[in-house]
Image: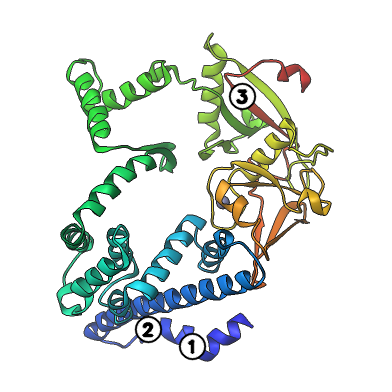
Amino acid sequence: MESCIVEHMFDVAELAAVDPHADQAALIEQIAWLERVKSAASAGQARAAAALDAKRRAAEAAAGVPTAKQGRAVAGEVALARRDSPARGGRHLGLAKALVHEMPHTLAALQCGALSEWRATLIARESACLDVQDRRRLDAELCASVGQLEGMGDARIVAAATEIAARLDAQAVVDRAAKAEADRTVTIRPAPDCMTYVTVLLPVAHGVGVYAALTRSADTTFDDRSRRQVMADTLVQRVTGRPADACAPVALNLVMSDQALWGQDTAPAVLDGYGPIPASLAQRLVRDAVVDARSVATLRRLYRDPTSGSLVAMESRSRVFPKGLAGFIGVRDRTCRTPYCDAPIRHRDHATPRNRGGPTSAANGLGECERCNYTKEAPGWRVTTGDQNGVHTADFVTPTGARYRSTAPPLPGAPLVAISEVEIRIGVALADLHAA
Ligand SMILES: [Zn+2]
């Protein structure tokens, strides 16, 4: 049904076809034309998203849903339809509503290709602190004549929008800066080669202060390390309270096959909060924890099905997910199970709610981030779990009837060989070793 509508409107394959005999000028023209197509498609997505939001709110208002709860899951639906994370779904929907309801010139500039979706997002972001009248003024001043957008990169777009916003309402811009402090946070994401980025978003004074303190320690340390290495090591030492080379952080959870643990197999391990790491690095983390008197390494056996390679289920009758079962779901799902989300797990939730007879079990349990757990409670959402050749599945059905499937990620180790998993908790009690 969905694909039929799209096919009637457009031949996607024709759009992607390139004439092998085209000359160079024609090729560059095609690249430019396709870029305009992408911008126009973004404008169409914005109109469709804003219309969906309006229709959903009207339908929910008619059904008696309180105003504050109307349309609360539309961003999640937009994200799934665009194969994007829920966080970006929220951004797309916010942009759509701003463009359609408040910024007609920016929308027109997007449609004709004068702006990319990202540059339209930047203008919407910089104008978000203004009231509707001022936002319309900014929209007209910056985008009514698309010729002046010619040649403007991301930074110039932001500078132009900020300058206009500050001229129209300086106080709003100042207030927004003050409010932004509330968004200070620390995040982590994987970097290539078994490295990781820990990012801290701070008010400017604190950020500059942290950087100055690290620079100072580099200025007063003289050994064979580079300045940048000293700064990184100092950061680890001051935050964790132990030297960077002690390599035994608080509760580092590793999942690896027992063969890999004993060095008989090279299947990668999975480090909680990071992802796969080579077996040799996992072995070193374990070895360092074992020889370090301040750390405790405990082993917990996690058995898995020798055929499918998935974890063996555990049952429980309690309403809140018991600790063992929650840990099990965390190991199985690794990140939020909503398709394209990948955020860290914050909730172990019942797919079929407890009040509709959903059991507290590994099969009915689902690792979810906070946002997705909230989204799937909205009217019209349904999540059902199942089993596909021994692999845990979750089907998400949204209010429009669109269906998306999520499967649990594979466990480390060759699925057909290993029959048990070992979880090493570094820095927690030793008792689990005997319980295993
Ligand atoms: Zn999520």
- Residue matched to label 2: 18
Q: In what quadrant of the picture does the N terminus appear? A: bottom right
Question: Tag 2, which secondary structure?
Answer: loop
Mark 3, ligand 1, within 8 Å: the answer is: no
**Residue 102 location, quadrant:** bottom left
C-alpha gap between disc 3 and disc 1: 54 Å
- Is 244 situated left or right of 306 in this image? left
Name the kind of residue labelled 3 in the image: Arg
The residue under label 3 is 425
In the image, farthest residue toward the bottom: 8
**Category of crowding for the residue at label 1, using alpha-carbon neighbours closer than 10 angstroms: few (below 14), some (14–19), many (at least 20):** few
Give the residue at mark 1: 11
Residue labelled 2 has its Cβ within 8 Å of some atom of ligand 1: no
| Residue 153's disc number | none
Give residue 132's position: percent from left, percent from top: 32, 67
Q: Amino acid at mark 1?
A: Asp
